Image (tube, rainbow, N blue to C red):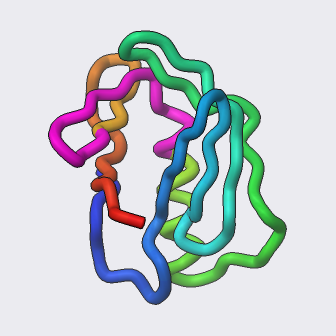
Amino acid sequence: VLASGAWNAEPPSLRIEANDANGFTGCTRWFSNVDRGEDALRFVGVGQTKMACLGPAGAAERQFLDALARVARYRIEDATLRLLDDKGVEVMRLTAQSR
């Protein structure tokens, strides 16, 4: 499960607006379309900026993108977005940040 942690730079992030999503993988910027329903959520056509990601930042990026690919549902609890796979297992947890 991805959550807050010690990052060399900015932590992975997710922003959803209408049918688009974007953010930071822990190394590069990413973007995708979003397919969502009442509690369903899928990231479709995920892409990212081209940049070599090595070491801890590369590992964070791979973990983040792998988790995004498994997302099928979501749950919001207070300021926390819990992203779940198709079996309801949490694959990522993100906390809302003020702008």
Residue, far bottom: 8
54 left or right of 98?
A: right
Count of marks overlaid on the render: 0
Q: Which residue is drawn at 37% across and 16% down?
A: 39
Q: In this view, does 19 lie above or below 49?
A: above
Which quadrant is the C terminus positioned in? bottom left
Is 78 part of what is drawn in magenta?
yes
Q: Is residue 98 above or below residue 77?
A: below
Q: Who is closer to the viewer here, 59 or 34?
A: 34
Where is residue 44 drawn, in percent x and y? Answer: 69, 29
Q: Who is closer to the viewer here, 45 or 33?
A: 33
Q: Residue at x 76, y 77 (%)?
A: 52
Q: In this view, does 76 lie above or below 51?
A: above
Residue 54 figure quarter: bottom right
Where is residue 65 drawn, in percent x and y? Answer: 57, 50
Residue, far front: 99
Q: In this view, does 21 lie above or below 97?
A: above
Residue 62 figure quarter: bottom right
Q: Residue at x 48, y 78 (%)?
A: 10
Residue, far left: 78
Q: Who is closer to the viewer here, 11 or 56?
A: 11
Residue, far right: 50
Q: Which residue is drawn at 47% across and 64% down?
A: 12
Where is residue 77 drawn, in percent x and y? Answer: 18, 36
Q: Who is closer to the viewer here, 32 or 60?
A: 32
90 left or right of 64?
A: left
49 left or right of 34?
A: right
Tell me which segment is drawn in magenta: 67-81
Residue 25 figure quarter: bottom right
